[in-house]
Amino acid sequence: MAQNNAPNPDAAQGSAPEEQAQPYKKKPREVKSSSMTLNLTSMIDVIFQLLIYFMLTMAAAVGEGVLTAKLPQGSGAGEKTELPEKPLNIIIQSAGMTGVSYRISIEGYGESPSNFSDLAKLLARLQYNSTNPSGAYKDDNPIVIKARSDVRWQHVVNAFNAGITAKFKNIAFARPSEEGGE
Amino acid sequence: MSKTCKRGGGKAEMNLTPMIDVTFQLIIFFMLTNQIASEESVTMIVPRLEDPKVQELETESRVVVNVVPPDYNEKERKGDMATILGATDGSAKNVRVGLDDFTFDDLGGLTNALKIRADQAKAKGQEIDVILRADCGTFYDQVIPIMDAITAAGIATVKITAYIEGESK
């Protein structure tokens, strides 16, 4: 009896709503066999796009490497390294209006290499080893890069790199000096 | 028989839920690390070297000390090295370590921050690696005070950043 009562209020509203409701009732029956699923394809597309984007932008930070360097000795508590009597001083001065170019010289040597590849070659010639017994400096002889204050960092690091290219192991930076040159 | 017929009516579907779970995890990971990495590395042009002997960095406890160059127009700093260098005045704005900025008047703060990080690394039994990142156009006398501040924190060596051959244009 109760079951019969339930649909009665719907019927009381009139026949028109019942006719409209019928198509909705039929449709679920047709798709009943397969369960209702959300279409995930587009979401996965978007997610993969995002994933690829973040992976690629993250890789953009790579491309830089490092050169290990000794710091100039100062007032700090850093470990003290004793400089032997004869460090090889590389002097870099800036040239040109904005310090775009540079002049390199090695203290005590007349040659002034025109670029850092030449500096590396000159340093390699000065180094004493089994293939170059005429060299005056061992590979652990300190190399000090003395750059003037208006020298660009580019040139300072390049000089440092030249020392490493020549297989010197003990390269340090000196405080900027104003004496010498213009 | 009728049961098998009904099953045959449904399509065979892959369960995508675990894949989506994993993918979301990856996205969140890359989003977070990406943000951290971009905050840590200030935009600048690091030196490009002749015949570089630069090595890839493999280290756990590292601190990147950025010598922040003044804001520049990226379009002006393209082409050969002379153009790139000429487009900057060689000054530096401040120093950034992680997400902290230090002015040149407050390099003591930089020293303290590095000391704390070095002690933390020591407590874990690791050596701290300080990476000095400066723009190629920065004047040497702008970098020296920062080197001094690092030395004052009891750190004797730094790693200097430059482009790795082959990975840069």
Image: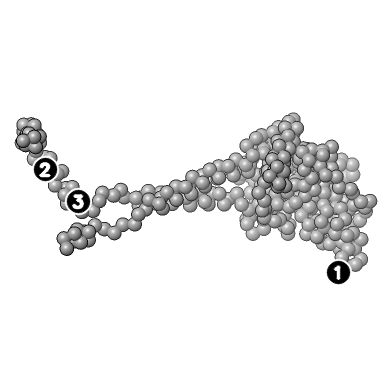
Q: Distance between the residues labelled 3 and 2?
A: 16 Å
Give the crowd class for mark 3: few <14, some 14-19, many >=20 residues within 10 Å: few
Mark 2, secondary structure of its residue: helix
Foreground disc of the pair 3, 1: 3
Per the rendering, the mark at residue A22 is: 2
Residue at left offset 64%, top offset 59%:
B166
Q: Kindly identify the amino acid type of the residue bearing the numbered disc 1.
A: Thr
Q: Which quarter of the rendered picture does the C terminus of chain B lie within? A: bottom right
Please report whichever mark, 3 or 1, sits nearer to the chain's N-terminal start: 3
Labels 3 and 2 positioned on one and the same chain: yes
Q: Distance between the residues labelled 3 and 1?
A: 86 Å
Residue at left offset 6%, top offset 31%:
A12
Give the crowd class for mark 1: few <14, some 14-19, many >=20 residues within 10 Å: few
Residue tagged 1: A131
Q: Which quarter of the rendered picture does the N terminus of chain B lie within? A: bottom left
Residue at left offset 34%, top offset 50%:
A40
Residue tagged 3: A32
Please report whichever mark, 3 or 2, sits nearer to the chain's N-terminal start: 2
